Image (cartoon, rainbow, N blue to C red):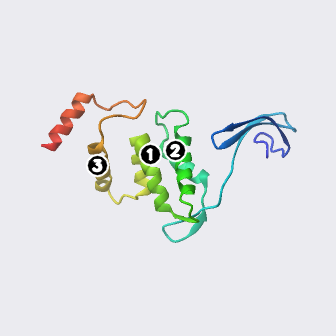
Amino acid sequence: MKCPHCGGSESRVVDSRSVDEEVRRRRKCIACGARFTTYERARSHNILVVKKDGRREEFNRDKLSYGIRKACEKRPLPTGAIDKLIDNVEAELYGFGKAEISSSVIGDLVMRELEKLDHIAYIRFASVYREFADIGALKQVVDSLAEGESLTLPANQLPLLPSKAVNSLISRKKR
């Protein structure tokens, strides 16, 4: 394990704890004395992701994490919610027990989880994942999300309008 501070290859484990399906280890670099944390997780088998153009590449949790974190950037989400979402998607992928999974299946799983977590992050992810051709297509998704919504917002998310104003807008639209 390379030290993130000096690049030294020797470290010793100071503390080790089991967290969910991971092992969290606190390490101390032998060369510079800096402390850092590593997380280890067991992989049951490798999954190949079949891309839209037919290419196949190995499933990469970091790539999935990057896309989800980009969609959730600057959103008032509870600590650990994004990691839990990524864990849920990854567990479901491995739960399929297949060697190859389409990228569209992964995208749909992420969108399902994001819709439950944060509507703005859902729209951000959908705008990239679904490659909307025009603003009209994006508007349809936003409208369908707003109509299907029971006006309960995710934790720590403030409404844009007071609930009376939202209800009057919805009732006007239905007329």
Which residue type carries mark 2? Leu
Which residue type carries mark 3? Ser
Could you tell me which secondary element the residue under label 1 belongs to? helix
Q: Residue at x 28, y 49 (%)?
A: 144
- Indicate whether 104 appears above or below 24: below
Q: Position of residue 73 (x, y in %)?
A: 50, 40
Q: Are marks 1 and 3 in contact (CB under 8 Å)?
A: no
Within-10-Å neighbours for mark 3: few <14, some 14–19, many 20+? few
Which is more N-terminal, label 2 or label 1? 2
Which is more N-terminal, label 3 or label 1? 1
Q: Which residue is mark 2?
A: 85
Q: Are marks 1 and 2 in contact (CB under 8 Å)?
A: yes
- Indicate whether 92 appears above or below 27: below
Q: CA distance from mark 2 to mark 3?
A: 23 Å
Could you tell me which secondary element the residue under label 3 belongs to? helix
- Indicate whether 141 appears above or below 73: below
Could you tell me which secondary element the residue under label 2 belongs to? helix
Q: Which residue is mark 3?
A: 144
Between 111 and 124, which is closer to the camera in this rendering? Answer: 111
Q: Is residue 31 left or right of residue 63?
A: right
Residue at the limit of the structure toward the bottom, as seen here? 54
Q: Is residue 101 left or right of residue 143?
A: right
Q: Which residue is mark 1?
A: 114
Q: Residue at x 48, y 67 (%)?
A: 52
Q: Position of residue 36 (x, y in %)?
A: 75, 36
- Quarter of the picture holding the C terminus: top left
Residue at the limit of the structure toward the right, as seen here? 31
- 2 or 3: mark nearer the eye: 2
Q: Is residue 20 left or right of residue 162?
A: right
| Count of numbered circles in the view | 3
Q: CA distance from mark 1 to mark 2?
A: 8 Å
